[in-house]
Image (spheres, rainbow, N blue to C red):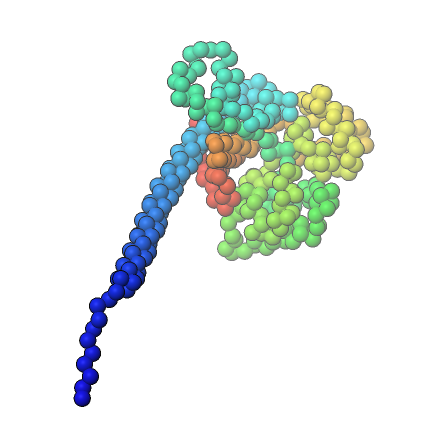
Amino acid sequence: MRTQHTSMPMGPQSSFARLKAQSGMALITAMITVLVVSIIVSGALWKSWSLAQAESAKRHADQAQWLLTAALDWSRVILKEDARASQTDNLTEPWAVPLQEVKLSNFLKANANGNDATQSNNAQDDLLASQVFLSGQITDEHSRLNFFNLLATSPAPPPIVHAFSRLYEALHLPQSELMQLMSTFAAAQKSENPPLWPARIENLTAWGLSPSSLDVLKPYATWINESTTVNLNTASPLVLFATLGDIDMSQAQRLSSLRATQPWSALADVQNALGSQYAQSVNSIYHQLSSKYFLVSGKIRIDETQIVSRSLVQRTPNQLLIVWSEHGAQADMNSFSSTTMTP
């Protein structure tokens, strides 16, 4: 006898459970849809914000670069006027006064000297100038010992070797590193295919100067691709100590104090200040009271954007030349460009 099974209609509870499951699935689907849409919208908003930020940063960088170029031109005017006014260079002259960070609007007003014709009538330009901060400095590169004088010839002149040795000793740097650097350059000069010579002091790390020594040496040493003299009017006490024979540091400090009151106008003035015992340490081959190489540094700050610039400038009787120049948020020390500035 076969038993027949007949399906029974679902009761109210089963229908409610099915409807509840369907509603739950619909809710999950809706939530997933909202989540996907939110991710897409967030991504689009982030991309739009990133593009806006990048565009703003580029605009600020372009504005900063333009302003730094203008500041370099301003430095050129100062150095040219200084050359006309005096045959010597010292730290009391206008070029030697650093420009502390100041609003561009204040700087422009200070240089307008009350001339309304030079003042902007554009409110937008005035607003921009009030948000831009400018700082800068001109440094006499003749106030430092030039590594080129030490390394370009072999053997190096004894007074130059003596000066660098005293500088290394005063800065507690290893003399062995200095000797190795001289040996490396001497070997390169004898090579059939010598490597490219440095363009600036930072490049000496490729020749054996350690980065830690470089950081210590930077205020007192430089690299210029020709023999240069030390300007005794602008050299720091430590450089005076290194380059003037065997004077001690107290004598170097005394010389620095004396010239601050009355800058020297002739090397004989320095010899008189040194006294007969050390007068012979002043040598016109290695020492002068005038300069032709200057390092022009500038920084522009607009909101969170900071652009820095450095240029080595050579002053000649007729014009100023840019030997090398670098700029950027973080200046690239391994690349440089050469340009000529017309008078």
Q: Is residue 205 left or right of residue 109?
A: right
Residue furthest to the bottom in view is 1
Query: Where residue 341 sits in the image (x, y, percent)?
Result: 45, 29
Q: Is residue 165 visible?
A: no
Residue visible at 65% across and 47% down in the picture: 213
Count of numbered labels shown in the rendering? 0
Question: Where 96 falls versus 117 (above or below)?
Answer: below
Q: Is residue 233 left or right of residue 23?
A: right
Query: Where residue 235 sits in the image (x, y, percent)?
Result: 67, 32
For the N terminus, the image quarter is bottom left
Residue nearest the observer in this picture, 118 or 269: 118
Q: Is residue 214 visible?
A: yes
Residue nearest the observer in this picture, 107 or 284: 107
Question: Where 206 falls versus 278 (above or below)?
Answer: below
Residue furthest to the right in view is 277
Q: Is residue 105 left or right of residue 146?
A: left
Residue furthest to the front in view is 1
Residue nearest the observer in this picture, 13 or 143: 13
Q: Is residue 7 left or right of residue 326?
A: left
For the C terminus, the image quarter is top left
The image quarter containing residue 170 is top right
Question: Where 169 falls versus 258 (above or below)?
Answer: below
Query: Where residue 172 sits in the image (x, y, percent)?
Result: 73, 46
Residue nearest the observer in this picture, 148 or 69: 69
Residue visible at 75% across and 31% down in the picture: 253
Question: Where 303 falls versus 43 (above or below)?
Answer: above
The image quarter containing residue 25 is bottom left
Residue visible at 52% across and 31% down in the picture: 298
Residue visible at 51% across and 52% down in the picture: 195
